[in-house]
Image (tube, rainbow, N blue to C red):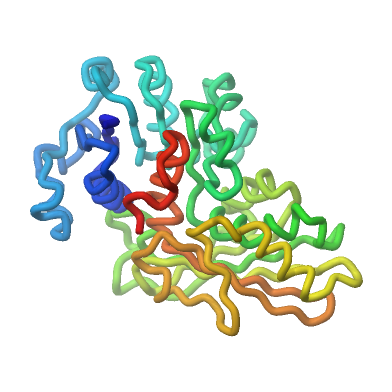
Amino acid sequence: MLKTIIVGASGYTGAELALFIARHPELELSGLYVSENSLDKGKSIAELYGKLLGVVDMTLEPLGVNDIANVCEGIDVVVLATAHEVSHDLAPHFLAANTTVFDLSGAFRVNDLAFYEKFYGFTHQYPELLEKAVYGLAEWNGGAVKATDLIAVPGCYTTTSLLALKPLQQAGLIKEGIKPTINATSGVSGAGRKASTTSSFCEVSLHPYGVFNHRHKPEIDTHLGTPVVFTPHLGSYKRGILASINVVLKEGVTPEQVSAVFEQAYQDQPIVRLLKGTYPAVKNVEGTPFCDIAWAQDGEDLIVFSATDNLLKGASSQAMQCINLKFGFPMTLSLL
């Protein structure tokens, strides 16, 4: 069995990962870690998440950079559910200890040093790791995931958008010069577990944010291969993302062609569900690893709808898909 640890285990995605790893027949959950200054250190993770009681009762241990060498002894897999700057600082140490690192932050998602200065506000120190990191969009980059020991797991908005758009872009059906327009709404859990006025129950309301400057926009541009207009919205519910994406197709593209490219892209991908006669709904993906996709066409105008659970397909279950791909396990192992 592969000995696996989670760093940043006290957050929402860390808790979901703990559950997936604990029930995975080929993985052994060998440690749950939080920062040295975390108020949660020393607590059982089941104290924070009651659903883990009797399933994962491990203690959240503090971790500093100087502890990594000892922590990594005998460890095969490290999952970083940490902030971007933290992952940036920790990943090189874990890689030097011959572990395979799956990073859920944005620290290694784009191979461009200037990207991090502009959109993340820090100077990236590891261009060689950006070169080796593979973007873990499981349905599209499975082969590359197998060939590296640093997997940058995509986030929720990017996964939801890219899975909807990549079949069209790869098939050359999108009209040149007209950007796809993505309007996506996420549940409040996308902001993380830390207390904040903007995510307080009494303050939350449906509203746009990050207009024209959200960091996921250039990430989508990079991995789609064409620029988009992206507007995120905060929804007044806990979890789940629904994206409505407007695309202008090349002249003469038929509904049959559109259906064919989606079916060809995902016919062997059990986590992506193509809906017929209905549209995606957050309630149908909440608590599941699925991405539900549907579309409607009127001449050259196409609207693609895509829904995921932001904590699962947008984070922890996609990380588990990548772990399964990397080590040759069935993609849905522990997920379904």
Q: Residue at x 75, y 55 (%)?
A: 169
Residue 36 pos. (x, y %): 21, 30
- Above or below for 182 versus 64: below
Q: On the rendered image, what quadrant is the N terminus found in?
A: top left
- Above or below for 331 versus 98: below
The image quadrant of residue 9 is top left
The image quadrant of residue 163 is bottom right
The image quadrant of residue 65 is top left
Q: In the displayed structure, does residue 226 sit left or right of residue 24?
A: right
For the residue pair 325 and 8, the one nearer the viewer reads as 325
Residue 290 pos. (x, y %): 45, 63
Q: Residue at x 37, y 71 (%)?
A: 204
Q: In the displayed structure, does residue 170 sit left or right of residue 308?
A: right
Residue 247 pos. (x, y %): 75, 68
For the residue pair 309 and 112, the one nearer the viewer reads as 309
Q: In the displayed structure, does residue 38 sit left or right of residue 254?
A: left
Q: Residue at x 58, y 21 (%)?
A: 127
Q: Point out the residue furthest to the right here.
A: 251
Number of numbered discs visible in the structure rendering = 0
Q: In the displayed structure, does residue 144 sit left or right of residue 46?
A: right
Q: Residue at x 24, y 17 (%)?
A: 73
Q: On the rendered image, what quadrant is the C terminus found in?
A: bottom left
Residue 18 pos. (x, y %): 25, 46
- Above or below for 15 versus 287: above
